[in-house]
Image (cartoon, rainbow, N blue to C red):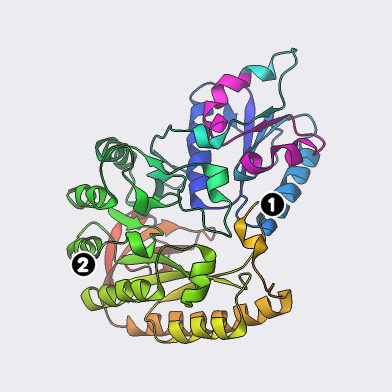
Amino acid sequence: MKKVFFYTLGCKLNFAETSHISKLLVDNGFSIAHKGEAADVCIVNTCSVTDTADRKCRQAIHKIVSDNPNAFIIVTGCYAQVNPSEIEQIDGVDLVLGAKEKFDILKVMHLLESKEQFERIQVDDIKSNNSFSPIFSAGDRTRYFLKVQDGCDYYCTYCTIPFARGKSRSASVAHTMKTIDKALEQGAKEIILTGVNIGDFGRGSNERFIDLIKAIDKLTAEVRVRISSVEPNLLEEAIIDIVASSKIIAPHFHIPLQSGSNRVLSLMGRRYTREVFGQKVSLIKQLIPDAFIGVDVIVGMRGETSDMFDETLSFLGDTPFSELHIFPYSEREGTKALSIKPIVSQSEKKRRSELLHNLSDSRIADFYRSQRGKTKTVLWETTKNPKVMNGYTENYLLVSAEMEQEKINTFQKIVF
């Protein structure tokens, strides 16, 4: 029985896909190589969201090649889709698979036994990929990440994701709900809806994201569902209404702002204004005062002057978010942003990032303090420390306690 080793970089979507590929191989005669075991096949699932991500991927590939000199090395994922020839040049890489081809992994496994010549790069034009099937990660028996959508049609000026993952696509609500049922059968207690642009769910089936939310809200199983990142313009007020009264869907939102300056949002090619973002956050806090709101912000975008950044800082100072996820702007080959001036220096990006990190640290502390003494429901899970268990409440408060094995993968009411 051949042993396969997986190494995944990047987002939760990548981890869900790796889990799916792993199950395909295990179901077809492979076994997973654990740390310290020699692997016959190594599969690296890569990320390419920033130049730093590309560099980390190259470093990981070199290390895996070095640690597994006799293994068949396959590299797939976003970096493989965008820059396959760059990966092919790395000594020791046997095969590069594109975003579509990675799900046909069983079709290429015959290359392990074949002595015939084969194309080392198997990467199709991602724009021609119309296929999609919902999948979920099963590596954690408590929290499952469910891929409900892939691709993006937005083409923001700084982003290469549409080139790596293709156009927006998803399955029908009915098909997606059947996949959720499978996760529940496996014991999932929390399901996180993931995708590249999940608010765009429904293309091809004449449905919308809210139709999926309505179907999920009708579940009767003991399960909690979290919604991952949704664009402000796609976060319908009706969705917020449903979450406000739902016993299934967690009061936890992740909304990308990227900039609090409308001038920068325009440079980025975003499809909303800061006013639209502010309106959605205000409604959430009005209807769900204890909701956790995470916000993505990019600092140092080309063209972002000091006064534009000050607009962002001021806007966020007046916005009731819970935590910021801060990303320094990264230049990506082939993007329209490369023609924008002026360029923000690395030192200035660092300064702006530090200001936002300080604001975020203050807000997350304020949020935790605001929840003290309130009754919440925690879902317990194991940690690397066998004496400690962790869990998250419905509104994403992290709780730790002394290990009680019988409580793992169960819900418990606590006073925070």
Q: Give the residue number, with chain letter if any, for mark 1.
A: 54
Q: Give the residue number, with chain letter if any, for mark 2.
A: 244
Could you tell whether 220 is left or right of 196 in the image? left
Could you tell whether 16 is left or right of 188 in the image? right
Which marked residue is nearer to the observer: mark 1 or mark 2?
A: 1
Location of residue 301 with respect to 116 vertically, above or below: below
Q: Nearer the viewer, residue 259 or 365?
A: 259
Element at label 2 = helix
Image: magenta residue range = 80-109
Tell me where residue 191 appears, x and y as whole percent: 35, 51
Q: Is residue 348 magenta?
A: no
- Which image quadrant is residue 353 in? bottom right
**Is residue 290 something one can see in this rendering?**
no
Residue at the spot 34% in from the left edge and 72% down from the top edge = 276
Label 1 and label 2: CA atoms lie apart by 40 Å
Tell me where residue 233 appears, x and y as whole percent: 35, 63
